[in-house]
Amino acid sequence: MPIKTINELDISGRRVFIRVDFNVPLTPAGGVAEDTRIRESLPTIKYAVENGARVVLASHLGRPKGKPDPKYSLLPVAQRLAELLGFEVLLTDEPVGDGARKVVGDLKAGRVALLENLRYTPAEEANDDTFAKGLASYADVYVNDAFGTAHRAHASTVGIAKHVAAKGMGLLMDRELKFLGKLLGEVERPFVAIIGGAKVSDKIGVLENLLDRVNQLLVGGAMANTFLKAKGGHMGRSLVEEDKLALARSFLKKAEEANVEVLLPRDAIAAPGTKSESGRIVKASAIPEELAALDIGPETARGFADAIARARTLFWNGPMGVFESEPFAAGTLAVARAVADNPGLTVVGGGDSVAAVQKCGVAEKITHISTGGGASLEFLEGKTLPGLAALES
Ligand code: ADP
Ligand code: MG
């Protein structure tokens, strides 16, 4: 069933409850360290304000263990949002309660209130119905714009929806579905997926679903170690998921049957540990006993960049190495640059991969950067996201 977008909903003069993703990183002093997520929610908030809605925003922030904790207050977020909007944002003292009811009740058209951290109570993640009803009591219209939590059935993403008559998605969510949806439909070919990161187990679902769609798969990161070991490689002290070797083997067989070429690293940067100040280039399937593979090597990076340059459609999730550490960042940065240089449809998802793209300064050259790591993977796995299903009408 179709999901309405906010511009298809009647919002003028009504209380519009927007579930946003303000789960931003904080500085040790408690300020907003990075405000991308706040800025990305602006188009939907501004649309609601400009169309005369009484806007009630709600988000979680961090993991306050189900009780109020000033360390996780949304106050710095409210302040940052007010700066970006150029007018006041009222923060309630708790997510639901007398204070919140009063703030929302007094809210005038075109004004914005923000509920305090939804995870100040365990009721949010438990999808508690009483809490969901409490949230719904602030809403004539429910809009979800938090793609990053759409794969979780929480009170503010699922429970609330059945208690509100009018519902739909925000502009950010709409954009996510548009671009991620493209990858699941007809695309220009070749379609190449680059998958890396820590674990095969995190990504096997998406790998399997992509097998029917992509022409080529480039595998890097620690994940590649498990595949290389499954093919008989010697991986030294590299991170390998021993219990996933059979899974990796059966995946490689399926890929062969599906006629999808899987490119594994040929060389690697190996070092004793992630704290090492440098690494050396070794054969990817013959890592010396005392070393771990921590990045793809230069030959692999060139091969991957060539494959990326030939693609017309690209999806990238997961860094090629321990990119947080300078000596092991080159492979990931090379992939980020190659993806950015590709003029076709390029989509990047995953918290760490997005960080790598930003570190490279090439974010604006990517067609779509997904804000939801886990949610984008589950979407591409073909799973139904509960937060989306709840919006169908
Ligand atoms: P994303 O957030 O983009 O989905 P992941 O969370 O799956 O990515 O993986 C990122 C993590 O994987 C990073 O912390 C990175 O250091 C780690 N990683 C990548 N390659 C290796 C490797 N060869 N050895 C150990 N850790 C790795
Ligand atoms: Mg990650």
Image (spheres, rainbow, N blue to C red):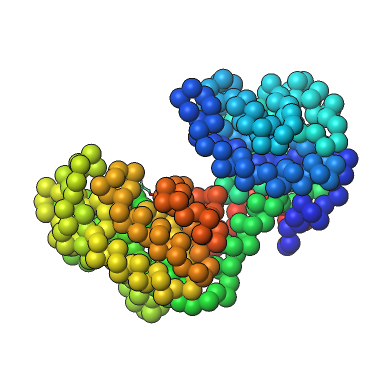
Left or right position of 380 against 6: left
Rendered position, 384 above or below 211: above
**Quadrant (top left/top right/bottom left/bottom right) for the N terminus:** bottom right
Rendered position, 302 above or below 225: below
Residue in view at x 78 percent, y 44 percent: 48
Residue reaching furthest right?
Answer: 13
Q: Nearer the viewer, residue 7 or 122?
A: 7
**Quadrant (top left/top right/bottom left/bottom right) for the C terminus:** bottom right
Left or right position of 275 against 202: left
Which quadrant would residue 98 be assigned to in this image?
top right
Residue reaching furthest left?
Answer: 289
Q: Nearer the viewer, residue 195 or 364?
A: 364
| Rendering coords of residue 171 (x, y %) | 69, 52
Left or right position of 370 against 361: right
Left or right position of 102 against 243: right
| Rendering coords of residue 294 (x, y %) | 25, 51
Rendered position, 53 above or below 115: below
Rendered position, 289 above or below 125: below
Q: Nearer the viewer, residue 42 or 144?
A: 42
| Rendering coords of residue 341 (x, y %) | 45, 65
Residue in view at x 46 percent, y 55 percent: 362
Residue in view at x 57 percent, y 47 percent: 148
Residue 136 visible, this orientation: no
| Rendering coords of residue 79 (x, y %) | 64, 28
Residue in view at x 53 percent, y 76 percent: 188
Residue 43 visible, this orientation: yes
Q: Nearer the viewer, residue 365 or 222?
A: 365
